[in-house]
């Protein structure tokens, strides 16, 4: 019996999502009184695989195969399911990232397991096996009971801080699996240079129609740079083509939960709030004191954003230079 | 090309979220239900565009009770050729995916499209489950879907960028923003939809593995703390010392 964590590789290494998932897996394993194992799948295994031990893995399984170089949900799901079966895992944990979302349901179906995705709490084992997860785009929280021997949990980002004090470097055991031929061929990869990926950002600065046009976006970008934050926008801004669609946060865009969300010139329609209201701290800057967003904010500034935002950027820079 | 589009029924994005006594279920009273926007705006419209340029048919499938018929008729009004309703409450992702797979497995679709997630349960699990149950390739959160010869070419997100991938069908795709633009059904479409076939089929037996046992609203926010717009150093101090986020 064990907990098996899919330690997702990004750019040849492990990012926060993988470390959070291993931390979560270890804490769940401790509750169940079993070992936590991590699984790394890829074309090549990174040297830092053994470092997953710091986050609580007792052992890392590695499967490297040229067919795993590019991501194919079928091959990855089958690899993960096979290792889960071989090692007697009772709980499989994945990060709820872009790839994790492509895998979670698929792995659950391959294993015939009960699954829950977007989980944001450790399991409650007092009666059955229950986890909590946001529903209705963050407007509510559900408690879900998972039945049967096998469970698959996809962990919402920023739900549990990665903890590198849960263990020490651990052994890496290479497994040989028969990997089928990939059905998906990568033609090209486009990187967004220089920006912080929105789903993983700890801090986000977001602009709405109040900015009046794309030519004013330097205000958002300057503040984001000072705060080491990603940039985002409301739906009308993306629909008007002021900003790319992948920056649209809200109910029909991306749902995010950073530690800090700064909303500038966004009124706070219910659909926008649904995508951001799980952020830890929300700052709203708007000239309209009646803007509904103030009701969801921790800190509010009623004022002209064209004056307030540069002032805030300077204040952040002063603070950073101290 | 033979295309299947899976559609869900969800509360309107404006709907007030409330629960029945003791949080046992979603309170549907006074709530308007709509077709899940990702299914309607992106999956269904892209399917219709492909049919218009390449020929073929678009079938919509839905797991739900007769209460869903209005959204199914809307899908037909937008342009789907026919519809199938699997007559059961879609109680979990696993249940829903198994119903869809049982229906789709004997029909030999070239392409199965779903929205990337529903806006009520946000699980994003059904498309991957369906792909696995049918043994098909799956491209998730696709922002573009084109045909080049016999192959599908898709753009999908990766952390910090996008990838363009090529896949031979049949396959399952979950659709995200960017794939198509919303279409409003016209009067002719609405009239025609009334005569298009809507077949109701019984569900297959599925063992329930997942149960939603309780719902609650998130804790209410404290009153907003208003900061003097002249004094942004104070805001920075609070973000550092009180909120501890910088």
Image: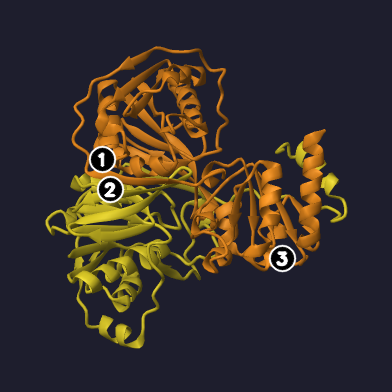
Which residue is labeled 2 in the image? B138
Label 1: chain? Answer: A
Q: Nearer the viewer, residue B205 or B20?
A: B205
Q: Residues within 10 Å of mark 1 (few under 14, many from 20)?
A: many
Q: Nearer the viewer, residue A94 or B209?
A: A94
Label 3: chain? Answer: A
- Please say if the residues under marks 3 and 2 sit with CB atoms less than 8 Å apart: no
Please give the letter of the chain rendered in yellow.
B
- Please say if the residues under marks 1 and 3 sit with CB atoms less than 8 Å apart: no
Please give the letter of the chain rendered in orange.
A
* Residue B48 marker: none
Q: Is residue A173 above or below residue A127?
A: above
Q: Quadrant of residue A70?
A: top left
Give the x, y percent position of residue A233: 59, 58
Which residue is labeled 1 in the image? A74
Q: Is residue A69 above or below residue B38?
A: above
Give the x, y percent position of residue A209: 64, 67
Q: Kindly report which numbered mark, 3 or 2, lies closer to the viewer in this rendering.
A: 2
- Please say if the residues under marks 2 and 1 sit with CB atoms less than 8 Å apart: yes
Which residue is labeled 3 in the image? A291
Q: Nearer the viewer, residue A207 or B125?
A: A207
**Residue B58 visible within the image:** yes
Marks 3 and 2, how far apart at CA: 42 Å
Specify the quadrant that holds the C terminus of chain B.
top right
Marks 2 and 1, how far apart at CA: 7 Å
Residue at point 24%, 46% (across, down)? B137
Residue at point 54%, 58% (across, down)? A250
Specify the quadrant that holds the N terminus of chain B.
bottom left
Q: Kindly report which numbered mark, 1 or 3, lies closer to the viewer in this rendering.
A: 1
Q: Nearer the viewer, residue A112 or A210?
A: A210
Marks 1 and 3, how far apart at CA: 46 Å
């Amino acid at each position: 019996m064990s907990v098996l964590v899919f330690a997702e590789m990004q750019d040849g290494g492990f990012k926060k999502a993988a470390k959070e998932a291993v931390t979560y897996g270890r804490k769940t394993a401790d509750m169940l009184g079993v070992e936590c194992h991590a699984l790394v799948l890829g074309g090549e295994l990174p040297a830092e695989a053994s470092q997953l031990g710091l986050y609580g893995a007792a052992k890392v399984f590695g499967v490297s195969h040229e067919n795993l170089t590019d991501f194919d949900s079928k091959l990855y799901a089958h690899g993960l399911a096979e290792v889960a079966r071989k090692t007697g895992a009772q709980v499989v944990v994945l990060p709820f990232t872009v790839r994790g979302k492509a895998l979670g349901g698929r792995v659950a179906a391959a294993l015939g397991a009960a699954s829950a995705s977007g989980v944001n709490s450790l399991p409650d084992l007092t009666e059955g096996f229950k986890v909590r997860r946001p529903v209705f785009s963050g407007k509510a929280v559900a408690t879900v009971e998972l039945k049967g021997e096998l469970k698959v949990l996809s962990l919402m980002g920023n739900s549990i801080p990665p903890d590198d004090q849960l263990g020490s470097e651990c052994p890496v055991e290479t497994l040989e699996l028969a990997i089928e031929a990939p059905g998906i061929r990568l033609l090209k990869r486009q990187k967004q240079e220089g920006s912080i990926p929105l789903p993983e950002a700890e801090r986000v600065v977001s602009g709405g129609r109040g900015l009046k046009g794309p030519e004013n976006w330097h205000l958002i970008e300057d503040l984001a740079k000072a705060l080491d934050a990603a940039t985002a926008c409301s739906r009308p801004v993306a629909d008007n083509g002021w900003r790319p669609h992948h920056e649209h946060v809200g109910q029909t865009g991306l749902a995010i939960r950073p530690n800090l969300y700064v909303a500038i010139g966004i009124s706070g329609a219910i659909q926008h709030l649904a995508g951001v209201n799980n952020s830890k701290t929300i700052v709203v800057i708007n000239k309209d004191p009646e803007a509904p967003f103030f009701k969801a904010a921790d800190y509010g500034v009623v004022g002209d954003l064209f004056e307030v935002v540069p002032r805030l950027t300077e204040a952040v820079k002063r603070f950073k230079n101290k | 090309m033979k295309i299947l589009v899976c559609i869900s029924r969800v509360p309107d994005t404006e709907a007030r979220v409330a629960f029945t006594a003791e949080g046992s279920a979603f309170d549907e009273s006074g709530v308007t239900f709509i077709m899940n926007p990702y299914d309607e705006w992106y999956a269904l419209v892209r399917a219709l565009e492909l049919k218009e340029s390449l020929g073929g048919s678009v079938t919509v499938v839905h797991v739900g009770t007769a209460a869903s018929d209005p959204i199914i008729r809307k899908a037909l009004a937008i342009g789907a050729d026919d519809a199938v309703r699997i007559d059961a409450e879609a109680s979990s992702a696993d249940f829903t995916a198994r119903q869809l797979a049982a229906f789709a497995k004997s029909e030999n679709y070239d392409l199965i499209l779903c929205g990337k997630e529903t806006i009520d349960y946000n699980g994003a699990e059904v498309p991957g489950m369906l792909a696995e149950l049918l043994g098909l390739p799956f491209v998730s959160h696709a922002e573009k879907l084109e045909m080049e010869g016999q192959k599908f070419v898709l753009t999908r997100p990766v952390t910090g960028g996008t990838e363009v991938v090529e896949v031979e069908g049949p396959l399952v795709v979950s659709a995200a923003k960017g794939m198509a633009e919303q279409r409003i059904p016209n009067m002719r479409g609405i009239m025609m939809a009334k005569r298009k076939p809507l077949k109701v089929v019984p569900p297959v037996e599925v063992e329930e593995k997942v149960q939603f046992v309780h719902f609650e609203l998130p804790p209410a926010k404290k009153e907003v703390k208003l900061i003097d717009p002249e004094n942004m150093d104070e805001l920075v101090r609070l973000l550092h010392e009180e909120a501890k986020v910088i």
